């Protein structure tokens, strides 16, 4: 099979692209629904919930709902990318931006270990792969 340019798509991209999409979708949806009020070892400082984590970063309360809503919308757009592939790159770019800021916020908390930024960094990397693919 050949794509529009006459080149064969890379088999690894065909396998990893959907895996990264699913990782992004599940990671965001879990964090902002089931995991929202649950303890996680990846929360900044001594925060036990998502609300406490945003407070730890010094962000206003309204930003919690804005960012959460944005991330859930982006996860839904990533789902639509399975049906309309043209959604993938712009959605991945937006997720890269949002998750890049999340990684920086994790690193802002100096007493935290780098491992606390791992989930954000993983979703950032998955999105970056989809963006440049």
Image: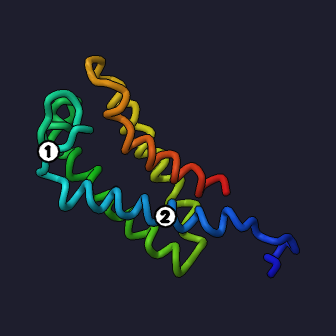
On-image quarter of the C terminus = bottom right
Q: Is residue 25 left or right of residue 82?
A: left
Colour scheme of the picture: rainbow
Query: What residue is at 30 percent from the left and 18 percent from the top?
Result: 110
Q: Which residue is mark 1?
A: 39
The residue tagged with tag 1: helix, strand or loop?
loop
Query: What residue is at 26 percent from the left and 52 percent from the top?
Result: 66
Q: Locate residue 42, reporting x and y percent.
A: 26, 38
Snapshot quadrant of residue 50: top left
The residue tagged with tag 2: helix, strand or loop?
helix
From what the image shows, is residue 97 above or below residue 73? above
Q: Locate residue 71, reporting x and y percent.
A: 34, 56
Snapshot quadrant of residue 101: top left
From what the image shows, is residue 110 above or below residue 57? above
On-image quarter of the N terminus = bottom right
Q: Which residue is mark 2?
A: 21
Q: Locate residue 21, reporting x and y percent.
A: 49, 64
Snapshot quadrant of residue 116: top left
- Crowding near the residue tagged with mark 2, few <14, some 14–19, many ≥20 C-alpha atoms within 10 Å: many
From what the image shows, is residue 79 above or below residue 109? below
């Amino acid at each position: 099979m050949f794509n529009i340019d006459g080149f064969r798509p890379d088999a690894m991209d065909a396998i990893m692209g959907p895996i990264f999409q699913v990782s992004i979708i599940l990671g965001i949806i879990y964090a902002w629904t089931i995991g929202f009020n649950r303890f996680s070892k990846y929360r900044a400082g001594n925060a036990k919930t998502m609300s406490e984590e945003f407070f730890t970063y010094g962000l206003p309360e309204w930003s919690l709902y804005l960012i959460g809503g944005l991330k859930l919308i982006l996860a839904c757009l990533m789902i639509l990318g399975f049906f309309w592939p043209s959604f993938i790159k712009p959605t991945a770019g937006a997720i890269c931006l949002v998750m890049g800021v999340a990684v920086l916020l994790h690193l802002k908390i100096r007493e935290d270990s780098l491992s606390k930024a791992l989930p954000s960094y993983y979703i950032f990397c998955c999105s970056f792969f989809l963006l440049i693919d």
